[in-house]
Amino acid sequence: MRVFVAGAGGAIGSRLVPQLINRGHEVIGTSRSPVNAERVRALGAEPMALDLLDAGAVRTAVLEAEPDAIVHQATALANVRFSRNMDRTFAQTNRLRTEGTDALLAASREAGVRRFVAQSFASYRYAREGGPVKTEDDPLDPNPLPSTRQSQDAMRYLDETVTRAGGIALRYGGFYGAAGDGLVEPVRKRQFPIVGDGGGLSSFIHLDDAAAATVLALEHGEAGIYNVVDDEPAPVREWLPVLADALGAKPPRRVPRWLARLVAGEAAVMIGTESRGASNAKAKRELGWELRYPSWRQGFMAAYAQATLTERRTAHSAARTTHSPT
Ligand SMILES: NC(=O)c1ccc[n+]([C@@H]2O[C@H](COP(=O)([O-])OP(=O)(O)OC[C@H]3O[C@@H](n4cnc5c(N)ncnc54)[C@H](OP(=O)(O)O)[C@@H]3O)[C@@H](O)[C@H]2O)c1
């Protein structure tokens, strides 16, 4: 297929493009800067300049590219500053999930594009009641916290609009597997604590596994929603110490709920204590997806431990050089 990937040089896009090419697809990858265009070209795709928030430009780009399929992986989460107000943090991503999705869907209808897959999110969205692990059929949180409402609405909008148009929304778990992952610095600096009993569940996914599921969904998924998460949704109190260890960081701090609410806001308390995980049974069953990293337990080590070891060795040998007698 000729596949148009919006956000081809990003965290997930850069894993997806080589896998698509390996499977024999031809890829047109969007970017907004010459540097990123070169990155997209180096991945093996044909670069195309595009701002997804310019609907006219999206129409022109899609009509010009004449793709068989579109994959929407554009988000704006790199280098964001997390604040007490999640909606402020996610404002630009929310626009990409609403306006960007609308523009791509309109263009894809006009160009006769047959397949459409878009990035959605699984963690911290399902209703915070009942069992710990949720399927795609379980209800989303009917009462999102006020500071997360716009972001929750944007993801719901994407899920509904895409599937109504006959496309696929992939609810990914928290991405990891790259040096610049969002959790790395806060965990290294011990700024990500275990809140209360640390019983809130997270679902993770290694970027390579996320890309593999995306290829399968694109090739033969049915219209609808798929959770793309690993086999082991886990409470923060379990995964956070393992991540800290893989990063060579000190163990996470523990803070009571009231203190976390005061310092980091209500959403941080919800994520740490109440959120539910997601089940990947449908994606495995219907897509024939097999995970290389079925659990974050192996995945965190594979992603970070070698880099941590190399950094320690470098620091150690620098210290020896400094202290060696001359
Ligand atoms: N599920 C998750 O847990 C999840 C999801 C997303 C991100 N993250 C985390 O967030 C960090 C990376 O964030 P990210 O994936 O948003 O950043 P990223 O790696 O820079 O990827 C974003 C992609 O979207 C494109 N993009 C952004 N704004 C656009 C616009 N207006 N029009 C067209 N394309 C646009 C970017 O391309 P250009 O800049 O070249 O245009 C880029 O290819 C990582 O730490 C990652 O782990 C996590």
Image (cartoon, rainbow, N blue to C red):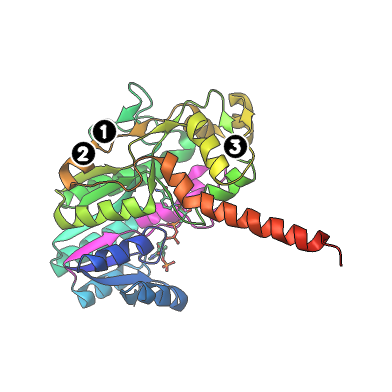
Q: Residue furthest right?
A: 326
What residue did someone put label 1 on?
135
* Proximity of marks 1 and 2: CB atoms separated by less than 8 Å: yes
Nearest the eye: 202 or 74: 202
Quarter-wise, where is residue 265 in the image?
top right
Q: Which mark is residue 282?
A: 2
At label 2, the amino acid type is Lys
Image side of residue 279 versus residue 77, left or right: left
Please report the bounds of the magenta region as a residue range.
67-96
Image side of residue 121 versus residue 113, left or right: right
The disc, 3 or 1, on the residue closer to the chain's N-terminal end is 1
**Residue drawn 27% across and 74% down?**
61
**Residue drawn 17% across and 40% down?**
285
What residue did someone put label 3 on?
264
Residue 129 position, x and y percent, is 36, 22
The reply to whether residue 200 is in sight is yes
**Residue drawn 32% across and 37% down?**
231
Nearest the eye: 90 or 171: 171
Element type where label 1 sits in the image: loop
